[in-house]
């Protein structure tokens, strides 16, 4: 039983589907890192209207939500996801960074979708495992440039890992994929997650040497938030949601709820530190007078 179960309304009789809108911040992410703990865990069967799907009948389904042809990829999303914002982010990033072109996007059936260019190459993590070698210096240099170029646009990809980097047979970076979690740099937490994530690394995909690139462009450039125990950027890993106009775009209610939570945590921590400081001063004055 989650410690946040009290935040769920009493009429909440069962877990909702993954496409349902959030009720509150904890409906989006539990504080120990688990996603959507108030949601059903099944993978929803996403589909387009038959008249739209006919256009992609020759595509091969390699994953439940991604279909491929020789030169195109069709990615489907929950109807709640704001695919318009994902496309806008990709278009902006493409001005400086290799990003697949978008041909078409919208909503059909029970989902949103993006039809994009398929870049033929190799996922970096598969390449490293195949050759059983460390990451080449030329890729590290290119990733540094990409991180800095995105930062100059005010963006953070938020998931730059070997699995999302497509390379050629000569180790050239062809493109970065999976832009679903890209967000404004000021709110992103890619560096915080990289240094805090408690997962086992594939020995052939260790990218710890990249951490400094993300720290150099992060909003918290000296690790002060981590030292103060404010790890909220760890949870800033979200897709943009559609809104009804009551929440400021472009990153939807998910980020709005997250930012509200962040501000509460910041005030609480500041108040706590101020109280500790005042208590320490009083204790010191008592010792001095005695």
Image: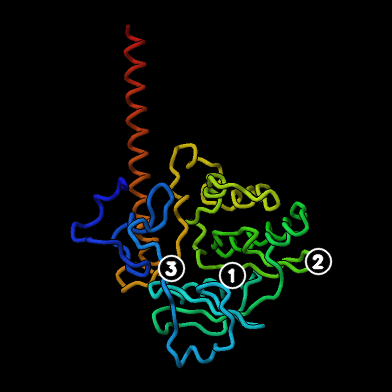
Disc 3 target residue: 43
122 over 214 or under it: above or below: below
Q: Which mark is residue 235?
A: none
Disc 2 to disc 3, how far (Cα)?
A: 37 Å
* Residue placed most toward the observer, 8 or 216: 8
Disc 1 target residue: 93
**Position in image of residue 100 (x %, y %):** 62, 75
How many other residues sit within 10 Å of disc 3, few (<14), some (14-19) or many (≥20)? few
Quadrant where the C terminus lies?
A: top left
Mark 2 in CB contact with mark 1 (< 8 angstroms) = no
Disc 1 to disc 3, how far (Cα)?
A: 30 Å
**Position in image of residue 154 (x %, y %):** 54, 62
Q: On the rendered structure, is 273 left or right of 90?
A: left
* Residue placed most toward the observer, 182 or 206: 206
The chosen color scheme is rainbow
**Position in image of residue 243 (x %, y %):** 34, 72
Seen at 32% across and 63% down, the residue is: 22
How many other residues sit within 10 Å of disc 2, few (<14), some (14-19) or many (≥20)? few
Disc 2 target residue: 170
Where on the picture, by quarter, is residue 98? bottom right
142 over 103 or under it: above or below: above
Q: On the rendered structure, is 109 left or right of 140?
A: left
Taking the view exactly as shown, the residue that stands out farthest to the right is 170
- Tag nearer the camera, 2 or 3: 3
SS assignment at label 3: loop
């Amino acid at each position: 039983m989650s410690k946040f179960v009290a935040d769920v309304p009493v009429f909440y009789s069962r877990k909702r589907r993954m496409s349902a809108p959030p009720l509150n911040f904890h409906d989006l992410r539990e504080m120990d890192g688990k996603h959507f703990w108030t949601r059903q865990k099944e993978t929803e069967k996403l589909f387009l209207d038959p008249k739209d799907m006919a256009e992609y009948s020759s595509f091969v389904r390699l994953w439940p939500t991604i279909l491929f042809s020789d030169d195109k990829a069709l990615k489907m999303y929950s109807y709640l996801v704001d695919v318009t914002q994902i496309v806008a982010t990709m278009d902006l990033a493409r001005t400086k960074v290799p990003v697949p072109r978008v041909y078409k996007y919208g909503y059909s059936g029970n989902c949103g979708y993006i039809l994009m260019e398929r870049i033929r190459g190799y996922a970096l993590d598969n390449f490293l495992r195949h050759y059983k070698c460390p990451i080449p210096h030329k890729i590290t240099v290119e990733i540094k440039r990409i991180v800095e170029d995105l930062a100059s646009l005010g963006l953070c990809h938020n998931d730059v890992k070997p699995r999302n980097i497509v390379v050629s047979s000569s180790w050239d970076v062809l493109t970065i994929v999976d832009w679903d979690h890209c967000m404004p740099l000021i709110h992103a937490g890619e560096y915080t997650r990289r240094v805090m994530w408690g997962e086992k690394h594939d020995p052939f995909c260790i990218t710890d040497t990249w951490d400094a690139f993300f720290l150099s462009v992060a909003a918290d450039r000296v690790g002060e938030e981590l030292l103060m125990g404010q790890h909220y950027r760890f949870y800033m890993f979200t897709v943009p949601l559609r809104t009804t106009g009551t929440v400021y775009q472009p990153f939807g209610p998910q980020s709005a709820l997250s930012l509200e939570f962040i501000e509460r945590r910041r005030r609480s921590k500041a108040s706590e530190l101020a109280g500790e400081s005042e208590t320490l001063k009083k204790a010191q004055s008592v010792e001095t007078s005695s």
